Each structure stands twice: as C-alpha cells, then as structure tokens.
Amino acid sequence: MLDAAGAAYRQGVTENANPGTRTVLVRVTGRDRPGITAGLMHILDEAGADVEDMEQVVLHGRLSLGLEVTVPGGRDLLKELLLFGWEREVEIDFEVAEEPVEPRPPGHVVTIVGERLGPDALGMVADAVAASGGNIERIARLARYPVWSYELLVAGGDPVAIRTSLLTACATHPGVEVAVQAEGLARRAQRLVVMDVDSTLIQDEVIDLVAEAAGVGTAVAEITRRAMVGDLDYETSLRDRARLLAGTDAAVLGQVADRVRLTPGAATFVRTLRRLGFVTAVVSGGFIEVVESLRRRLGIDHAHANSLEVVDGRITGELVGEVVDREGKAQLLEHIAAAEGVPLEQVVAIGDGANDVDMLAVAGLGIAFNARPVVRQAADATLSVPYLDAVLFLLGVSREEIEAADAATGN
C-alpha cells in the first residue's frame, strides 16, 4: 500500500550517504483516537526532525493529519512511522517536497449560509472562487441548525472579483448567501455591533404598532412602506407619521414595548456577543420609549432612537431633539465607536432599510439582514434567513460553540 511512497522517501532521503536536510510531507489517516498526534511528535523529536507546518481535521470520527517536516540527512523515519501506523491502525504515507513553496498570497474568508447547502450550492461557490483566481485552502462547517453554514479560507484572487462572481452565481441559487471578508486580525477583533431595531432586532415596525393602537394604522403603515424603500425623505415621513399620533394616550408606548416580537435568534445573538466581550448598541428610527425597554430586556449597552413629545399624558405629535435618520444613524455609530475606543474597521453594523445604508457603509462590516434591494447592493454581506444569530457565522462563531456556552451557563 505504501510501497510507492516508501520508495520515493528512501530515494529522496536515504539512498544518498549524505543527502542533507529534506522536506517531507507526511499524511496520516484513519480512525481517530487519543495519543496519535502525541506519538508522532515523540518519533519526530527522537529523530531530530523539525515540524514546519501541521494541520489536523477530524470528520465523523476519521482523522486526517498532514505534517510538513524537515528530516536530517541520513535518518530514515520510514520504518518507525510505518510501525507506529500499524500499531495505532492508521495509514501513513510520505512525499518528498522537491520544489520550494511560493509565498502564500493574501487570504480571504468566504462564509456560505443557506437553509440547506448541498453539493450543487457548494460546487457553485467553489467554481466562483476558482474563476476569480482564488484557491480554497480550508473548509470548516460552522452550523447545520437552524441554517447551514460553511467557512472557506481562500488564498489569492481579488476579493472584489470573488464577491462579484459569487453574487452572480448566487442569483441562480435562491436561498444561498455568501460573504467575503479579508483574512486577518481586523476580522477577528471586531468588538462593536450596532443594530437597527425594526425588522432587524425585532419582527415589527414600532411606529406601526403605536399607530395601530392609536387607530391610524393604515395611514401610518403606507408612509412607513414608502420611507423604507427610499421613496420619501425619512425625517419628513417620520414627522408626518408622528403628527398622526397626536392626542394618543402615552400609555400605549409601554403596551407596545410589551407586544414587540424579537426576531428569532435575537436573544441568543446578543447573549453570545456579550460572552465574546463585544459592545452592543441599537440605533433606531423608532421611539426610545420602546427601544429602551428592549435594551434593558436584552442587556444591550447603548440605545438611541427618536423621542415623542408627551404633555399631560398625551402624545402631542411632535418630536423632541434631533431626529435619528439615515445620516444620524451613521453619526451615532461613529460616536459610540469613539466612546468605546473601537476603530471603525472593527465595527459590525446590521440593518434592513434605506435609512441604514450610511451606517452599513461606515462600519468595517455592513450586513444587510432580510433587506430591501437598495440595502443589499450597498452592504458588504447579506443574510436572507429568519434567524438573527446567523450573523455569528459571519464572525466565525460556530453553532457548537454557541450551544456549548449556553449549556455551561444553563441558558
């Protein structure tokens, strides 16, 4: 089974009386069990070999371990390694690396998310990466519940070309979402997440719920719809809607705060971010009386929204203070980041409407979550799944890590 590999190894390492140091690639496969890696290290250490690189993966209980080792001249590791493999019931083969490896080009991380990711979708992604000059070096599954997600480490290729190619390919594969990010410290160090509220953190539009309680739901909902697709100036539309609420008992704001429905996965998302040490914030074009209730409920660090004027327990229809609109959201993100000492490239912003576009552009990673087309086109990444905690996969957090943390704390 290993005759060819052994012959190549002997020819490259042992036939010459003084061949000098050689680089050998060692591959170990078989059923995983404790002590395999440790045993290999002991053999290499006793032989005076150096480990230059190593990567190990266990899939369905099967081990795949690759090592790049430099072997001193005159030393034959073949017998020792073959004996070790026979004792541990694993297969070991060798390859002498004759040519030097070119320096690794800059890398990118491609994250795939979908309700179900089969060979058709995965093949589409692989084709798009290859067509853009990238080479997939590593694939890791992040989740298969409530959605599937894989993370691909890609070397080389132009990130803009990779993203364009992937988005074009995904257009023919509904339900498959991709994100492309530069590999490196900035991605792993993202420390602030800023979220929109309506239709992002929660499933509702707060102003529509307030309007419904005030008996003007239909008129307000139509203005909301036109504002969210960008047909109306946001501040004008907000003031028009607020005026329709004039005379309403302010107690409805508390009632609405109790009625809002969190987006599936929202509590898990915020809880996991807090465990990771992230700062969290919400910025909303809705009303602070409702948004502040959400902040306390979920343990979010910062909350900003518009404030309705209330006189003698009644909503007057006017707003107090500056309006949180498209530009205001971006400014608030910058203000929060500066206050927390977080560089903008380490900020993640999440939103769905036209008034979120500037905020997504300012952040290091802007994510369009179940968003309108105008927002999807402007964002760095898109997610069109009903679970907010799927955003964690874009940050490289796996479902297993989330569940393990919840189990450890009883959540």
Image: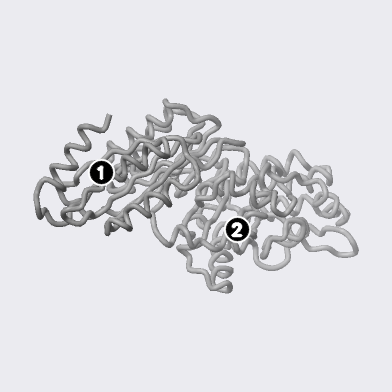
**Which residue is situated farthest in the right direction here?**
312
Three-letter code, disc 1: Leu
Name which of mark 2 and mark 1 comes first in the sequence.
Answer: 1
**Horizontal and vertical percent for residue 138?**
38, 43
User: Which residue lies under the disc numbered 2?
Assistant: 325
Q: Nearer the viewer, residue 142 or 171?
A: 142
Q: Nearer the viewer, residue 137 or 185?
A: 137
Q: Which is more foreground, mark 2 or mark 1?
A: 1
Is 385 on the left or on the right of 256, as rendered?
left
Q: Quadrant of the N terminus?
A: top left
User: Which residue lies under the disc numbered 1?
Assistant: 78
Image disc number at residue 283: none
Give above or below for 354 relative to 121: below
Q: Nearer the viewer, residue 168 or 126?
A: 126
Is 214 on the left or on the right of 68, as rendered?
right
So how many labels did they put on this image? 2
Residue 128 figure quarter: top left
**Horizontal and vertical percent for residue 165?**
34, 38
